[in-house]
Amino acid sequence: MNISTNENNPNTLKLIIAAKFAQQAVTVKTVQPKASFLGRLPSIEFPSGLILFSTNAAMQLIIPLSEEFKVVNNKWLEWEISQLQPAIALYGSTGIYKTSQKSCLWSLLKELNNALKDKQYLIKGNNDLSLADICIWVTLWSTIMVTEIGNELNKEYLSIKNWLSNIELLTVIQDSIKEYSFERGLKAILSIQAASWFPVNATLNSKPPKPVDLSPTKEKEIEAVSQQEIRNISNNWSSKSYPDVKNFPYPVLPKKGEKNILITSALPYVNNVPHLGNIIGCVLSADIFARYCRQRNYNTLFISGTDEYGTATEAKALEEKTTPQNICNKFFDIHNDVYRWFNIGFDYFGRTTTPEQTEIVQSFFLKIKSEGYILSESVDQLLCESCDRFLADRFVEGTCPRCKYEDARGDQCDGCGHLVNATDLISPRCKVCGNRPIVKKSQQFFLDLPKLENKLKEWSSKVEKGWSSVARVVAKPWLRDGLKPRCITRDLKWGIPVPIKGFENKVFYVWFDAPFGYISITKKYTKEYQQWWKPKDIQIDLYQFMAKDNVPFHAIMFPAYLLAANEGYTLLKHLMATEYLNYEDTKFSKSRGIGVFGTDARDTGIPADVWRFYLAYVRPETQDSNFNWVDLATKNNSELLNNFGNFVNRALVFVEKYFESKIPAIELQEDDLVLLALAQRELSSYIHALEQAKLRDGLKHVLAISKHGNQYMQFQEPWVKIKGIDSDKRRAGTIIGICCNLACLLSSLLAPFMPCTARELRSQLGLQTNNYGYIPDEITSILPTGHKIGKPSPLFKKIEEKDVETLRKKYAGKQDTTNNDEHGDVKSLDNAIAELDTKVKELKAKHDKSGWPSKQVQIFVDLKNKLSDLISEKNKSSELKSKNPENFVPEQNGDISMDVASLEAAITKQGNLVRQLKAKEEKSVWQPEVEKLLKLKKQLADLTGTTPAPTDKKSKKKK
Amino acid sequence: MVLCNVECLERISNYLDVSPLPLEMQENVVVATKRESNQKIEGFSTIIQSLIENSNPDILGVNNEMKALSQQWLEYAVICINYADTPNNAKKVLQELNVTLTDKTYLTGTKKTIADVTLYYALHSIMRELTHQEKAQYVHVSRWFDNMQQEEKLRQQLDLISFDLLHLFL
């Protein structure tokens, strides 16, 4: 056996003694802790090649413990390594061995002393030296016995003293000491420390750990305010003036030498109603940031709009028997209303179906082509014969060629995050009908991304430091893995026509046209749009906000277009991507009615500002976060009402009541300066956070200021001082004057998050409400003595628990099942079937049923129930009543055989329905029902792994 | 609150199908009391090893060398993971385990032992709070943990933690 050890480590002696006992030979080699596994020493290598760094485990392997005394031996071995050694190590670094704590070194020795009373060896009933004896003996004898503790121990703990000296006399011990000589005492302790890690000491030795939750209402240890901070705040307060907010003329244009901030929020796709996650992901985040920039007097332009072209809109129009343009108009209004209600202050909210967009996209394309970055190639396109159309990427699913994820989409794989070409999918299927599409040739244009790769890399390395971390993580694999040419045209109708002869029937791919929407929408806002997008000699900082799924298109594609055009366009500088927001631990789902959508928010009776506040508070900045009703109510009641609202209201009411609504004179004292210095820290952190668009952190610093204010008021008790002698009254005036000034500062800091509330507060403060106030770097006196305030009133309302419970239930799902629209039912049934199908596949992929995650099983069962509900409802609403009226009820235990049974029942039912319909109705009526039947059968086949039952063939023949 | 606590031991008992012993915390040490003899068993690792004796001795390891290895990692749990409830300690523990698991399926090699089971429970609260970036940073721990949590019996009522490939793909 080979022992590796650092110099002077007493634990090595244990191994040598154990080996002597077992009459085995060892070699000892001195190494540095750096060179060993995890920096732990000593380590021992056995003839088999096994290496152990745990001395205790190694000793047990060398000398197996007898069954009889295993538990007690184990106990002492564990005690030695987890308590005694750490305590000795702590003594080695601090010199402390007596404290009030139970597990301090001195009390550990006492415990040992008691255990050794009247015994020769530690383990009762065993008259031999045990492993526990060896281990503890070595540790004590080598270390503390030759320090000051040794003397005290010899006086107080006689049992230990006797036990130590008895063992020392044993031959095996004497021989071993001769074989491994080292210096006892402090040096030995330091050697143990150098080659081990006892985090318990870090915990005992240091300040209490920083709470992970940044909630400002939790007590935190506050670092004392320094004299320098006091001096600064005192100077600023008396000498600096508070600047005004600029009045920006229309249109806002960038200016040389000033900060020019161009902000875009990802263009929401027109085809659906945005939910809370969409709202905080892009438009609301961008709005908060834009408002902050304006209050910092930066030249700020914030634009967004709806993304309207693409197959999804086309499909929806077909479905609703109208034109794509009508669909867009309808949904544009919905989006516009939702954002207006949320007080999103766009400079312009436009759309992509404008002549400006067509002109810009076409001229960009021609420019990029003339620069030599466009290839033309014949490509294999997927054509679904049963639907009679070329399938857009989002209408194909299949197995990812890269990671073999089964449900990769035609444009992107959710499994590995890579973009895929729809034709590369293994066993593709049409998302609408489930049939396998055929491949047909078609001539298309490609963007030559490999040719642009170096330019992109050069640009990316310069700017990516300013991106949010999720943006970097998503974008990185792209450039690292190399880029491929990307097809930018499609065989569709609803889009921007390709301006090249021979391509009249094709349009641009939606992700080619959409990013140019930012430019065309700016052009709708001002003719001078090129000052923002093609600046001459002016620095423009472009901030783009989006959820993480949009990152590749903004980090790679859009910059690639602009770089290819080579005309000095403004490129993305700060990519602000968020993770996803979940709803009550599940996903938002429009089809299942789960979650709050933009149009629902106003029906809840909760003000838009509170929504904005809470969404910013849970903004998924570093990881997916969760919307929770109870949490919403708690945050409203604790942070807004009790913390922020309470502070400003108390201050203002006090001025109204005792100072005739006029700000009293302020004479700063030490206590006041400390408060202002603490607020200054939060203000600096707020600005630091918001400059990087870390909105969530910024909001917490706002709340921290009002918390400091509350504590200050509570401590100073102005309501007592106002009733005292004149000097006390003056003091009360100072305190309240300071609080009012802080309230004024708070109104401007809160304004980006809660504009209506901030405006209300400003009117209560007697300030102009045509702006939100400047956000200063330093705290100064804002409200002069004698300034007259307005009428104070509470800013926030309590949200009752029972109300949120009602709301929680309302948006927990199944709200749409009352929909009598035939079409809706068929569609949701189709969705449910598709989802069920996917889940079944997922579950099947895991062979062992015991490995099914319980959540999945729950979803599975839920879906089954939903499916059966829909089927029975469908049958009820059908004019033809089934002869057999008993409802089809599936089993609920998630058992495979039961699933088969319920599917079979569903198939029988559907089969009857089809037969009845076929007897009386036209094909157009029964055809969809036949398709449903086929789908159910396919599911059954998937589940059982067998070919469909013979009835299937029959129905096919009939068809 | 240390991580090698009563709750952790109760989960291990459940997993081993042994009725849990009455447990209490004395300072940072768990103490169990044996029902029949009223004998006290002190120490987290000691209690676990005694639980195994009564149920499934092989889960410690099928031979003496494997047993020694899993004892080593139980000891590691007691000394180190126990205090990973602070961010700095958690970071170092995850770093060390990431190194350890670089070339192994389980802590002791290719067989799941009680050490893996114990670490799964002790680390669950830490793993749950990791950001995607951290999960990617400790990719070997993430892989091991994800593999472990697939066993439903082991997971009991604990959350299934997402190790979404999209984010682990650095």
Image (cartoon, coloured by chain):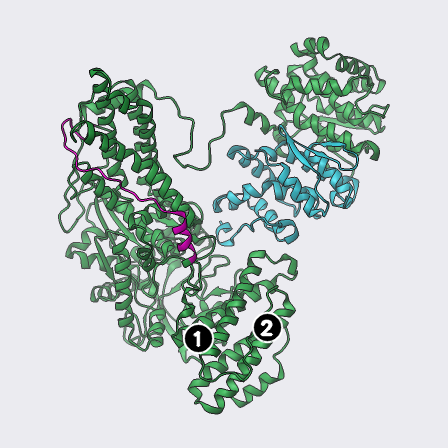
Dot 1 crowding, Cα within 10 Å, few <14, some 14–19, many 20+: some
Q: Which type of secondary structure does the marked residue at label 2 adopt? A: helix
Locate residue A906 relative to residue A367 in the image: left or right.
right
Whether residue A381 is visible here, answered yes or no, is no
Colour for chain A in the figure: green
Mark 1 belongs to chain: A
Q: Position of residue A361 (x, y in %)?
A: 26, 64
Q: Which residues are magenta?
A: A781-809
Q: Which mark is residue A826?
A: 1
A808 in the magenta segment: yes
Camera-side residue of A565 and B93: B93
Q: Earlier in the sequence, mark 2 or mark 1?
A: 1
Q: Which mark is residue A517?
A: none
Q: Position of residue A159 (x, y in %)?
A: 77, 14
Specify the amino acid type for callout 2. Ser
Colour for chain B in the figure: cyan
Q: Main secondary structure of the magenta part?
A: loop
A70 in the magenta segment: no
Whether A875 is drawn above or below A559: the answer is below
Q: Quadrant of the N terminus of chain A?
A: top right
Q: Residue at x 63, y 69 (%)?
A: A898
Mark 2 belongs to chain: A
Rendered image quadrant of residue A466: top left
Camera-side residue of B148 and A555: B148
Whether A200 is drawn above or below A539: the answer is above
Specify the amino acid type for callout 1. Val
